[in-house]
Image: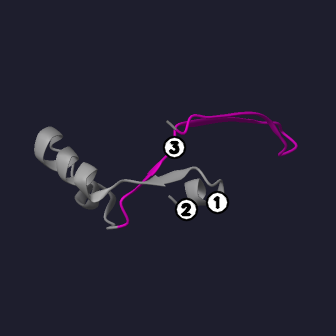
């Protein structure tokens, strides 16, 4: 999550969604991540050159 935060590609999952994930799908974000921040990374792709320059990025915030 530290890397996702540094790239600003995180979103906070609302309490209602956290409950739905747990009750309907058996996904316990707190137990699985070990944290109570309810953050997930945004789906993203980065292509980085050997020189460290980002050549391509795609971020899907929806």
Residue 12 falls in image quadrant? bottom left
Return the residue nearer the eye: 26 or 62: 62
Say left or right for 1 vs 29.
Answer: right
Q: Residue furthest left?
A: 23
For the residue labelled by badge 2, is the local secondary structure a helix, a strand or a loop? helix
Return the residue nearer the eye: 53 or 40: 40
Residue 24 falls in image quadrant? top left
Residue linked to disc 1 = 6
Residue 4 place in picture, x, y as percent: 57, 53
Q: Is residue 34 magenta?
A: no
Q: What distance separates the C-alpha of mark 2 from that of mark 1?
A: 6 Å
Q: Is residue 40 magenta?
A: yes
How crowded is the residue under tag 3: few (<14 C-alpha within 10 Å), some, or many (20+)? some
Residue linked to disc 3 = 42
Q: Which mark is residue 61?
A: none
For the residue labelled by badge 3, is the local secondary structure a helix, a strand or a loop? loop
Residue linked to disc 2 = 2
Residue 3 place in picture, x, y as percent: 59, 56
Q: What distance separates the C-alpha of mark 2 from that of mark 3?
A: 13 Å
């Amino acid at each position: 999550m530290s890397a996702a935060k540094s790239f600003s590609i995180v979103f906070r999952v609302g309490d209602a969604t956290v409950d739905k994930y747990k009750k309907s799908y058996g996904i316990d974000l707190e137990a699985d991540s070990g944290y109570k921040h309810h953050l997930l990374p945004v789906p993203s792709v980065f292509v980085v050159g050997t020189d460290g320059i980002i050549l391509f990025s795609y971020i899907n915030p929806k």
